[in-house]
Amino acid sequence: MFKKCLFALLIIQGSLMSAIIKHIEIENIKIPVVFEQQKSLPILNMQLVFQNSGYIQDKEKSGLVNISSKLLNEGTKELGSTKFAQKLEENAISLNASNGFETFVIELSNLKDVSNKAFSLLEDLLKSPNYSEDTLSKLKTIQIGALKRKENDFDYVARNLLKSTLFENTPLQNPNSGTVESISKIQLKDIKGFLNNTINLSNLIIVAGGDYTFDEFEKQIKPLLKTLKVGKKKEFEKVEFKSVAKEETLIKDTQQAYIYFGSSFDVDVDDKKAYMAKVASFILGGSGFGSRLMEEIRVKRGLAYSAYGYVSINKSHSYFTGYLQTKNETAQEAEELVKQIVKEFVKKGVTQEELDSAKNFLTGSEPLRSETLAQRLNRAFTLFYRGLKQNHSKKELEKIQDLKLEDLNKYIKSHDEINNLTFSIVRK
């Protein structure tokens, strides 16, 4: 019966996920386009995604990529921030730049009947960003002010302490938003250099959907693409690190102990057994109530309101991480309990009941992850970016449903590197 339900869900998912991978050729560069036509609303949603261009490129200038994205949100040199924003608002156009660790993204959203205006404003922005000392000074003041306020956000402090410890001597050790010291040193030439080296055809992947055929969209975007230089493709950088069992504690005047922990988890995005990591992660700490961490730490002992842990699998790096808050006086007990839970998880694996519950949730909730156009485009892009086939999610669900207990426990036992837990603790 459950098998029949699963296949029904997969059919629903297949009908929802209709994104396709096409290419647009400009200057002998074939630019990938993740595209889906949706006729229900007269809109266009588009992202220009520049790969290998997130804050992995900060190097010694922590926060540079983040402040560069903020500058692109300050309008053009000619109009300035306020007048440019007014033009966007008058036409109900949303235009925003942002970044992650691996990517730099410019997102455009508008009604179809103002698409010409939207692309014109985007072209103006890319040709002439608001490069001015006044703009940079304003952004730095805002950013430094926000960072100083976060000095008393102990959750933020503990999370960054874990990053600096777990990912020491890698691009991941620094926060995306930079530090007070690093932001104060950023100059206009640094931002110009980054944007000039990033916004080009060689690094570009386009993600788009809405009330367009692909031919209509191609005709709409080609004039914009022709204004971009070919540029040089940034090489993909794999972040290599090995966690060690250690603890970093920061003493602050806080009412609670903030505990973050993490470790290596050796798996690549294209690993044929990565689906097992997804199931193991769900059971250990990713499922909320019912997970090992939540049951042992909150339900049985009442040491924390919540406790989470999950495996994060990315193209450049993968790791296990988790978090909880507890009383200052029970911080040591909670830390030791996390170590014990993870150690026992690796040694003994999971039960059949836990596996069945994970299967039911992961397969049953799958259609909810592809309900909207944005969700489907994001998934299609992620699969393409990671070098996976567009039917990967469907195949992964089938593998999860067929997963045997002994195979999962054998997989879990093979990843004993998860026991090398690094802790960051902020407490009184």
Image (cartoon, rainbow, N blue to C red):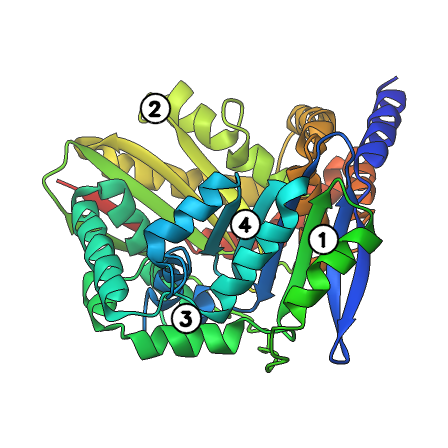
Disc nearer the start of the sequence (1/3): 3
How many C-alpha atoms fall within 10 Å of the one at disc 2: few (<14), some, or many (≥20)?
few
Dot 1 falls on a residue whose secondary structure is helix
Question: The disc labelled 2 sits on which kind of residue?
Answer: Tyr
Q: What label sits on residue 170 in the rendered view?
A: 3
Disc nearer the start of the sequence (2/3): 3
User: Is residue 87 something one can see in this rendering?
Assistant: yes
Q: Residue at x 71, y 45 (%)?
A: 209
Q: Are marks 4 and 3 in contact (CB under 8 Å)?
A: no
Residue bearing mark 1: 383
Q: Residue furthest left?
A: 253
The image quadrant of residue 276 is: top right
Dot 3 falls on a residue whose secondary structure is loop
The x and y percentages for residue 267 are 62, 58
Residue bearing mark 2: 305
Single out the mark in the foreground, 2 or 3.
3
Residue bearing mark 4: 312
So how many labels did they put on this image?
Answer: 4
Q: Are marks 1 and 2 in contact (CB under 8 Å)?
A: no
Image height of 227 relative to 76, above or below: below
The span from disc 2 to disc 4 (Cα, nearest Å) is: 23 Å
Question: The disc labelled 4 sits on which kind of residue?
Answer: Ser
Decide if residue 308 is on the left or right side of residue 411.
left
Single out the mark in the foreground, 4 or 1.
1
Decide if residue 54 is on the left or right side of residue 367.
left
Dot 2 falls on a residue whose secondary structure is loop
The x and y percentages for residue 282 are 59, 35
Question: The disc labelled 3 sits on which kind of residue?
Answer: Thr
Q: Nearer the viewer, residue 16 or 108?
A: 108
